[in-house]
Amino acid sequence: MSISAVLAPVFVQAALTFVLLYWMGYLRVTSIMRGETKIRDIALRQQNWPQRPTQVANAFHNQLELPILFYALVALALLTRKADFLFVVMAWLFVALRLLHAYIFVTSNRVTRRFQVFLAASTILCLMWIVFAVRILIDA
């Protein structure tokens, strides 16, 4: 597969992370400017933000957890030339599920639905790692 085909889902995942980062920042600054949140109440990372900024912040922080394994895998797959059509399809499935997960997080935040999507995404990523590992070990 071409490098651009392999990296396209990475760019979308990174874009999602940045969108949530700036949205979180906007909501937090707005909350402080409106007087809903006092800086002294959050200066030491206390959880004293209103619900909406917290909801978006949680969605943002979630992008810094499981996707780390995705980024590492893509880098390794490119380096070892193991990124094929199946890899790219699975990468897009993972990113699509991450987008859906973030959407659920910042809208209804239905925990059961959110967990189902998280489980599907983590299963896809696990399968990607297994396929990658098998291919590396077979070639060894």
Image: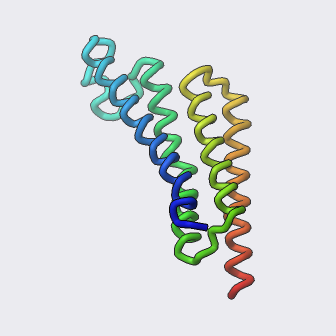
Quadrant of the rendered image containing residue 111: top right
Which residue shows up at 30% across the image and 34% down it?
44
Please say which color scheme the image uses.
Answer: rainbow
Choose between 39 and 70: the one closer to the eye: 70
Quadrant of the rendered image containing residue 90: bottom right
Vertically, is 90 above or below 29? below
Which residue shows up at 46% across the image and 48% down it?
14
Whole-percent x, y for residue 21 in the image: 39, 36
Whole-percent x, y for residue 26 in the image: 33, 26
Whole-percent x, y for residue 105 in the image: 58, 29
Q: In the shown orientation, is residue 131 left or right of residue 69?
A: right
Vertically, is 87 above or below 63? below
Quadrant of the rendered image containing residue 23: top left
Which residue shows up at 25% across the image and 24% down it?
40
Vertically, is 103 above or below 98? above
Which residue shows up at 72% across the image and 29% down it?
112
Q: In the shown orientation, is residue 43 left or right of residue 58?
A: left
The count of marks equals: 0
Residue found farthest to the bottom: 140
Choose between 50 and 71: the one closer to the eye: 71
Q: Quadrant of the N terminus?
A: bottom right
Q: Quadrant of the C terminus?
A: bottom right
